[in-house]
Image: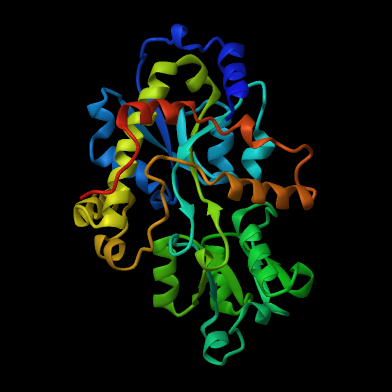
Amino acid sequence: MVVGQIVRHMTAHGAAGSQMRARSGPITLGVPDGRLHAAPTLVALGRGWFERYQLDVQPVPAGSHRTGVPRLAAGEFDVSPQAPLLGFFQLFDPQRPMLMVADQGSVRPGRGEAAIVARPALIETGALADYADLRGKRLGLSPVRGDHDWLTFAAALRTGGLTFDDVEVVICDFGDARHEAFRTGAIDVGTVNRLGSLMEGRESGAFVVWRHEHEFRQRQERAIVFSYPFWSERQEDAYTFVEAYLAGLREYYRAFEEGVEREAVARVLAERSGEPVEAILGEMIPMAVDPDGHLNVSAIEADLDWLQRQGLLERRVAVDDFVDDRYREAALAKLGRYHPTD
């Protein structure tokens, strides 16, 4: 968020620094169903960073993106790791804005678990060797055209010189329905982005990984998002939350990028996510995180452009209206910029 917008946000809602309110009660943290999507936040929780900053952060189930964003917009919880997807932009209210304040994981080269998966026979026979081979295939896609799998396949098809007109779209939601569609042969390819689901599909023989998303596109997977009541009424807590969170984010980064206490951090993720620690250590492709919390704004803008071209947004939402750097910058003024571990 540029300086002009920062001032407007702060003055319009009576949240200037001199008007910060004292801490008042617990901070509710909406954790998504796919708990590993919130991995840096889980590390901050499990390694005690919020307690060190004297914050009472209470995790609550947020459900899927489709339920989590509306609940955050309604102020049912204060903070949540959420994705910059269609649901967020449709519910964004410039008068009561939710704010994205720090990186919570992105897809970058070599990083990010999300994958295009396919029926094993297509791989074994060579019928699906390159992106152009998607032509004529049955793609299992979410009933919501703005969900991440539509964006993922738009990029994959473009890489192969194709569009959605060149494939057969089969509406098939995430989870069990998609697994069953693979088992029955109703779909040829789809996306899966949870470690447990990838392992389940491989073990059942329903599907195998064909391409990881990081091979053909970048994406801001999730961000730390503040509800309007939280950031406008509890400024001191909001600033402190980001400082504590970045300390935890850096532990995640050091563990998976530098190998510092990797097993200890993996155990925290296993305890908090329910995934086996062996799978986290041996099979998980960690999401990319910026140790200073920078969001991949260009990736967010690219996805916004696609959503708008598809006619899915009645109005364009400006990135500067919801990406707010002041909390992160204030945290870095205290923590310092990140330097690799010696």
Say whether residue 311 is left or right of residue 333. Answer: right
Q: How far from the left and from the top, in percent, is residue 238?
A: 42, 23
Q: How far from the left and from the top, in percent, is residue 297?
A: 57, 44
Q: Quadrant of the N terminus?
A: top right
Say whether residue 273 is left or right of residue 304. Answer: left
Q: Residue furthest top?
A: 18
Of 301 and 285, the residue lying toward us: 301
Q: Name which residue lies at 56% across and 64% down.
A: 177
Image quadrant where residue 88 sits? top right
Q: Name which residue lies at 56% across and 65% down.
A: 191
How many numbered discs sit on the rendered protein? 0
Query: How is the protein colored in the picture?
Result: rainbow
Q: How far from the left and from the top, in percent, is residue 45?
A: 29, 38
Q: Name which residue lies at 60% across and 47% down.
A: 298
User: Is 38 drawn above or below residue 128 in the view shown?
Assistant: above
Q: Name which residue lies at 65% across and 64% down.
A: 155
Of 245 and 205, the residue lying toward us: 245
User: Is 189 drawn above or below residue 41 in the view shown?
Assistant: below
Image quadrant where residue 61 sits? top left
User: Is 16 drawn above or below residue 305 in the view shown?
Assistant: above
Q: How far from the left and from the top, in percent, is residue 34?
A: 44, 51
